[in-house]
Structure formats: C-alpha cells, structure tokens
Image: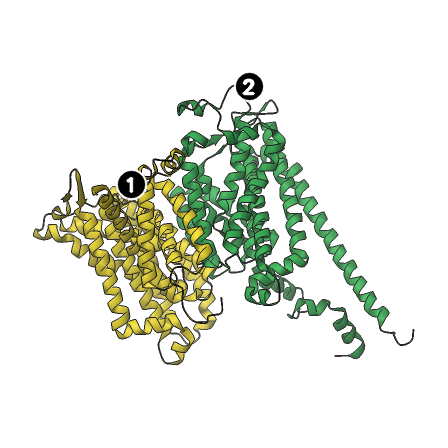
Amino acid sequence: MTQLLEAIFGGLSIGSVLLLAALGLAIVFGLMGVINMAHGELMMLGAYTTFVVQNAFKGTPLADFYIFFALIAAFLVTALVGLLLERGVIRYLYGRPLETLLATWGVSLILQQFVRTVSWQFVFGVGLFCLLFFGAWWFLARRPDFERLRGWVLWVMGPLSAAIALVSSSLLGNTFKLTVTKPWFGTQGVDVTAPRWLRGGLPIGTGYQLPYTRLFIIALTIVCVLGIYWFLNKTPWGLRIRAVTQNRNMSSCLGIPTRTVDALTFAIGSGLAGVAGVAVGLLGSVSPNTGQAYIVDTFMVVVVGGVGKLVGSIVAAGAIGTVSYIIGSNALGPLVSFSPALTSFFEFFASASMAKVMVFALIIVFLQFRPAGLFPQKGRTVDA
Amino acid sequence: MTTKIAEPSVELSQSSGLRKRRRSLLFEAIAVLVVALLLLLIIPPILTGLGQGVRVNQLGRFLSLAILALGIDLIWGFTGLLSLGHGIFFALGGYAFAMYLQLQLPPGQIPEFFNLYGVNELPGFWQPFYSFPFTVVAIFVIPMIVAAALGYLVFRNRIRGVYFSILTQAALIVFFNFFNGQQKLINGTNGLKTDTSTIFGVLVSDPRVQMVFYGLSILFLAGAYALCRWLTSGRLGRMLVAIRDDEPRVRFSGYNPTWYKVFVFAISGALAGIAGALFTVQSGIITPKAMDVAFSIEMVIWVALGGRGTLVGAILGALIVNFARTFLSEQFPEFWLFFQGALFLIVVTVLPEGILGWFRREGLGWVRSRLRGPKEIETYPSLEEDPDVQYERKNLGD
C-alpha cells in the first residue's frame, strides 16, 4: 500500500515539474508555432534568480518566506528576458519554425555562457557597448536621411563601440582586479536551500515520507495551472490569445493586435519557465546546464499532449511523469515475478536514464496511433 | 518533310543543351578531382613544412565531418526535414569501427575494460565485429537501418516540421542514455579508445595509418559528393525539393512522400555513419559525447552557414565552423559558446541562404556589375531551358 502510494506520489511530483516546465512552452508553441529551445535556459535563469533572492534575504526577518519573493522575481526576470527575445529575434522569424528553433538554440548557448562568465567587468563592458551602439542608433535614427546612413552606422558604430567597451572594461579589470573580474556564479553549481518550513516531510506509513518541497511544487503547479486557466478563459487578453491561436488571420482582421498578443504570450510563457525554475532550484543544485536536463522531456509533453491544449499538457505530463517513475524505480519488476524474463527486462530499464529509453519507445508507439497527440485540434485543418 | 521544318532546330537546341550540361558536369568532375589531389598531395607537405603537422590530422577529421554535413544537406537543404539526431548515426558508425579495432587481440582475450566490470565473456553482439568485411558493411548499414526504421515510424504518420526535429532529438537523447549507461556492454561514459589498437598489424596512431585515413576521408568525401550530386540532380532531387516546398501538394499529385523521405533519411544516416568511423579513427576515441545534443544541432549550423541546398556549401560550412572553433577555443576558450550562439543568430537572421547562397544572389551580381556583364533575368529556370520556349523566342520573336 505504502509502496503504491509512494509510486503515485513520485510520479505525480515528477509530472508536476514537467507540467510546470511545459506549460509555458505549450502556450507559446500553440500560439506561434515557435519551439523555444531557450526555454530550459529561462528555467535556469529563474533558478539563479531564486539563488540571488535567497542571498538578498539572508539575515532579514523575511528570510523564511523568501521563496514567495523569489517566485515573483523569477517570473518578472524571465518574462523580461522572454520579451527581449521576442522583440529582438523571434519576431523576425515568424512562419519559419525551423529557423526559429536554431535561433533560440543560439540564444540558449549565449545564456548558458552568460551565467558562467557574468561578472561586474562583463556587465560593465556589455552595458557600455549597448549604451554607445544603441544610443548612437537612437540618436541617428531621428535624422531624415537615416536610411542612407544605416549601413554606415552599422559598420562604423558597431566595431567602434565594441572597441571602446573592450578597452575600458579591460582597464577596469586591471585596476580593480578580482573584485570586478570574479564571476558571480561561476561554472560550478550553486545551491538553493529550501526555507525552514519546507524541509522534512509528511510521514506516511512506516519509513516513508512525502517531502514538503515536492508537496509545495505540486501545489505551485496547481496554482499556476488554475491561474493560466483563469487568465485564458476569463480575461479579455486571454480571449484574444485563444482567438489568435485558433485563427491568426481572422483575428487580425477583427482588430486583435496579433503582434502584441504574441509578445505578451511569449513573456507569460517565459515567466512560467521562471516559476518552473524556482521549483527546479528547490529540487537540487543549480548549474548552467540545468535547463538542458529538462528540455527534451518538456518537448515530449508538448508532442504527446497535442498542440495548444492545456488539458493535453496536463494529462501528458502526468502520464510521462508516472510512467517514467514507475519504470525507473522498478515498481513493475516484483509484480511480474512469475516470469523471470520479464523481471530481468524491467530490471534492465530500472534507472532514471534507462526509463527515458523506455518512455521514448512508448511515445513512438503512441504516436503511431495518435500522431497529433492526445487532444488534437478539432476542425477541418489542412495539414500544414 | 516540309511540314516539320521546326523539328531540327528544336533537336539541335536540345542536344546543344545536353552538350552544355555534359561539359559543365565534366568541368565539375575535374574541379573535384583537382581539389581532392590538392588536399591529398599538396596540403600535407606544406603544413608539415610549416611545423603544423597536427593540422593535417585536424583537416582529415573535419573532412570526415564534411561527409556528415553532406548528408544533412541532403535531408535538410533538399528535403526540408531538420534532423537534430544525426549524432546517433555518427556514433553508430564510430562505435562499429571502434569495436572492430578493440577486438584486434590474441584469441581468447577480450577487451580490457570488460574486466573492470566483471564481464568474462564477450557479449553476443560483439562477435560479428571480429570480421573486417562485416565491420566495413556495418559502418554504414547499421546507421542506415536505424535511420530507416526511425524514419518509417515517424514519416508514416506524416509527422514533420518541428515535431520531426523534436522526435529526432529525443531519439538522440535516448541513444545517449543507452550508450552512457551500459558500462558492461560498451564501456559506458568512457567510450572506446582506438589509437592504442592495431589495424592489419600496425598501430592505429601510427602516422602512416593516419595518412591513409586522411586519404580515405578525401576519397569518401569526393564519393559522397558525387552520390549526393547524382541523387539531387535527377528526378529524385526534384521530388525532394517538391516535398520540401509543398508536401501536401506532392501527396495530392499521387506520390507517396513517405518512401522518398525514408530513403533520403537512410542515405543521410549512412553518410553520417561513414563520417563517424573516419572521425573516430582519426581522433583516437569514441565516447557517448558524440551524441551530445549540442553537437547534433551544431551540424545543422554548418550546413546553414555554408548554404543549404548547395552541396558545396555544406562542405565549406563544416570546414569553416570547425576551424573557427579550434582557432577561437585555442585563443579565447571562454568565448566560444558566445561566438557559437551569435553564429546561430546571425546565420538565421542575416544570412538565411548561407555564404554560398548569398554569393550566388548578391556577390555574383556584384562581381558581374563590376565587369559590366549582362544582368541575368530571374525566372523559372526550367522555362529558360525549355526547347519549346527557346524555339518560340528564336523563331516567332518576343
């Protein structure tokens, strides 16, 4: 009995992390057809934000409740990064999903290296470059003959501001040495510690307990899902998002600002990644590679669930989480002890990484029967 | 006789077109031969003379990666399927060859690493790799079979676009996990070393052997280029482009795109397998890291940078990016990821057709306008070559 409860709970908690991670991705993918490969890195940013907030609150009376501030901060930071990403890169690539995939992969590489190397010197250099380059751009863009100057501005101001930023930041590094050149986070992982009231667990039966952090994550997931459901179904902007998801051209004709909807959705999706990042931070150490560990599972949730369906994502995340937990923890092995071959078969797959192998095989089989996912978009759509 | 007066002129133009095509094909073959001989005979002595002997080995490795890039160009550039899982086929080819090399032992012995994990008997699937002919075939047939099976299961359901990319990536991760976790079967994370074993009685890391593999890389690259060129210039190539541009329409026209896609995916996998074997033997080791997600996505960017849909572009891209990477990570080890990320962004946003595509579209026109040549009119290329159109232009006036 306890073992069964444990299996269900373990699967549920894995599934809830997956769902939290997949939620933002699914909304964005459903709306814009954009696969955001940087989603995992946005989660990582959320986890690092948690780390920063935790350190900021250390020693203050609110230290026990830093997690709530961290949730808000992570949401805001990643939503902002997502907005920048959409405005800066993705909006030029609509209708070219494969190219978007590559571009966001590039962004994810940059973000990974960013958290590894970011230091005061680095921030100063990048900031100075942006100030000079975009300042000049902004200033010159108001000239009437800007179109003629554009190429010139790009090729002269770019290298010039880069050179100035490089020289001055290396000067800064030489004067202040380690105080400015030391990376903030470094390549090593950092640890987010759960607040005191989240340590330990709820004891059930003998020798087993439900960890409070996992319960917290499940609760967080439920809140997020309800929040998104409420947002999509009860607010005017939610209505617009749903309209654009169903038929972009028609919505545009009816006066819905589709570009604004895109930007807003992308920001919200990224913000959800940040919230997922907080949850991931609670589960273990956070390193620049954290995002990579989740990204493919998250995609699988989106593929199995069907595009742009909240229910699909929920069911798929639950199913994938439970199945991989059950296989990974070898819960099936003892059940089939009548057949040694089957037992050894399940034992072969009884580890987290081998469970992935099995789950992937099951997903491929599943897609043979339902290629469009659990809850495909209804209606007469040309397959395109 | 008198009524068919137009006939000879049409035939004439047709045969002259054919002759022109044949001549350009001959020209291309000569160019490939010259480049290959240049790489084989001229470059190594020059590099060794400059004291850069290591670069020859590097060049050999990158040339084998170019074979892989050709395969990706075939499937992405021509067929429009973005595979993020080519690392699987690459690694399968590499492992197949490495297993053969590991088995170059006195009879009765098994590779050393097995002892570490308490395995006393050679696992069954290692047995066939004692035979050299089997290995040579396995290097490209095993990846081909895996690619065909995976492709069939996916394409059968008309899964394509981003879904296909994600599924191939998931498959990659699955294979990675499998190879990484199975210490007892294939030495898991540590991979298989090849440079300490022998081939036909000579140490693999011997410079002469390495030189042979360098030559083989060039040979196979030229062969792969010829194969891809042949595949894409005929009817199959047109079918692939049609699938890329509008698959539903291909299906409505009565073709079944599935088998074309399975076929091209399998060919692409086979090329990746060959590349993997050549790369492994020149770098001395194969580990599950060859199935790293980042590496498989990077392969795509080689093709994108060079210019997709242009076979030469794929080769160029592979060489450029890999040399840029070695150079940059030697100079500024920290910043390679920044550069790589920027490369992805720039190629996708500014250079969507790659270097070669840009050159054909802009650069060539620029050169021509400098030389005051006539400006080429852009229209359907088939229209220009159509004998009927040419006949009408010539005889009926515009």
Output the chain of dot 2: B
Q: Nearer the viewer, residue B46 or A79?
A: A79
Of the 4 image quadrants, the one containing the N terminus of chain A is: top left
Residue B173 makes an appearance in the image:
yes
**Residue occupying the far right of the picture:** B1
- Reply above or below: B104 against B8: above
Tell me the number on the disc at residue B107.
2
Specify whether B99 is left or right of B335. right
Q: Which chain is yellow?
A: A
- Reply above or below: A145 against A7: below
Q: Residues within 10 Å of mark 1 (few under 14, many from 20)?
A: few
Amino acid marked by disc 2? Pro
Residue B271 x %, y %: 58, 44
Amino acid marked by disc 1? Gln
Which of the two marks, 2 or 1, is nearer to us in this view? 2
Tell me the number on the disc at residue A188.
1
Q: CA distance from mark 2 to mark 1?
A: 46 Å
Specify whether A275 is left or right of B146. left
Q: Nearer the viewer, residue A326 or A96?
A: A326
Tell me the number on the disc at residue A352.
none
Name the residue located 54 percent from the left edge and 38 percent from the top edge. B93
Write down the colour of chain B.
Answer: green
- Tell me which corner region of the image, top left, top right, bottom left or bottom right, holds residue B13: bottom right
Dots 2 and 1: beta carbons under 8 Å?
Answer: no
Q: Residues within 10 Å of mark 2 (few under 14, many from 20)?
A: few
